Amino acid sequence: MRVIVEKSADEVSRRGAKFIASLVRRKPDCVLGLATGGSPLGVYAELIRMHREEDLDFSRVTTFNLDEYVGLGPTHNQSYRYFMQSNLFDHINIEPKRTHVPDGRALDFEAHCRQYEQRIADAGGIELQLLGIGTDGHIAFNEPGSSLGSRTRLKTLAGETIRDNARFFGSEEQVPRLAITMGVGTILESRQCLLIAMGDHKAAAIRSTVEGPVTAQVTASALQLHRDVIIGLDEAAGGWLERREYYAEVERANELLESGQLRALGIGNQ
């Protein structure tokens, strides 16, 4: 894992957007996995700015979202399709047919989930998956206890998730109890994962994800098994990490490598 701790949430968002923009520029027909919730909002705002001011082109990009509430249609103001349209898709030049969000009103959920997996495979797989993290350490709607090999499926939401999301709905009673979500196994097949987290309320989950054991009780910990993961944090979210100084040293070395300053790393001095 490449753990990057920035001074502020805004810096985390800008850094996250740069990783995504770099892929889009390098491979204009790339496949992105996208997330909803509070964490990616700053990333999406920065991508919109890059599109408007730096000509970042999304016309050939394909996207797949992690999840959707069961029972909410695309025009419901708390559906994740509505979220994506309002916070990203309506503001960039992406083709609507290239954007995919699970259908919360599917009549045959099992068939719909199989089809969603097939669409990902047909697109060539997800190249970069953007992730947030729940306060209990879940990714997408893979609640504690979810199989680390799980695929896209119907999932019952945990009480903590319902409480966390009640602020968007006005009360816990209005939060849907079921969702369609990509599985942990689906996420781990992405070629790169970018998880971002901000705020001290995420610090415990981040420590468990990065430094704890791999366990189904903290589904984000499965990212330890992935070959290419970037974790972007602000000071508060990274506040409980025990090896934070080492992560900072690794990041300084990465920056020197990326800028070609090899002598500062002792390469070529002999």
Image: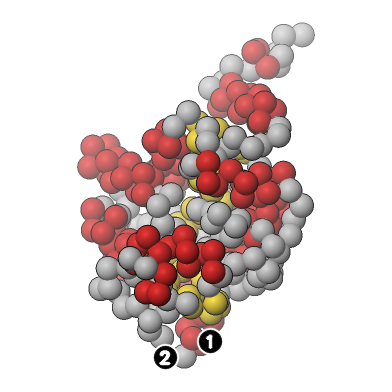
Looking at the picture, how far across and down is residue 80, in whole percent? 36, 67
Residue type marked 1: Glu
Location of the C terminus by quadrant is top right
Return the residue nearer the eye: 164 or 84: 164
| Mark 2 crowdedness (10 Å alpha carbons): few <14, some 14-19, many ≥20 | few
SS class, disc 1: helix
Residue beneath the point at 27% across and 68% down: 77
Mark carried by residue 110: 1
Disc 1/disc 2 C-alpha distance (Å): 9 Å
Residue 133 placement: quadrant: bottom right
Return the residue nearer the eye: 220 or 95: 220
Return the residue nearer the eye: 256 or 217: 217
Residue beneath the point at 56% across and 59% down: 139
The residue that mark 2 highlights is 107
Q: Is residue 121 visible?
A: no
| Mark 1 crowdedness (10 Å alpha carbons): few <14, some 14-19, many ≥20 | few
253 w.r.t. 30: above or below:
above
Location of the N terminus by quadrant is top right
Left/right of residue 231 with respect to residue 1 in the rendered view? left
Looking at the picture, how far across and down is residue 261, in whole percent? 59, 16
Residue type marked 2: Leu
Looking at the picture, how far across and down is residue 111, in whole percent? 51, 87
Looking at the picture, how far across and down is residue 109, in whole percent? 49, 86
Residue beneath the point at 48% across and 42% down: 198
SS class, disc 2: loop
- Asked whether the beta carbons under mark 1 and mark 2 sit within 8 Å of each other, the answer is no
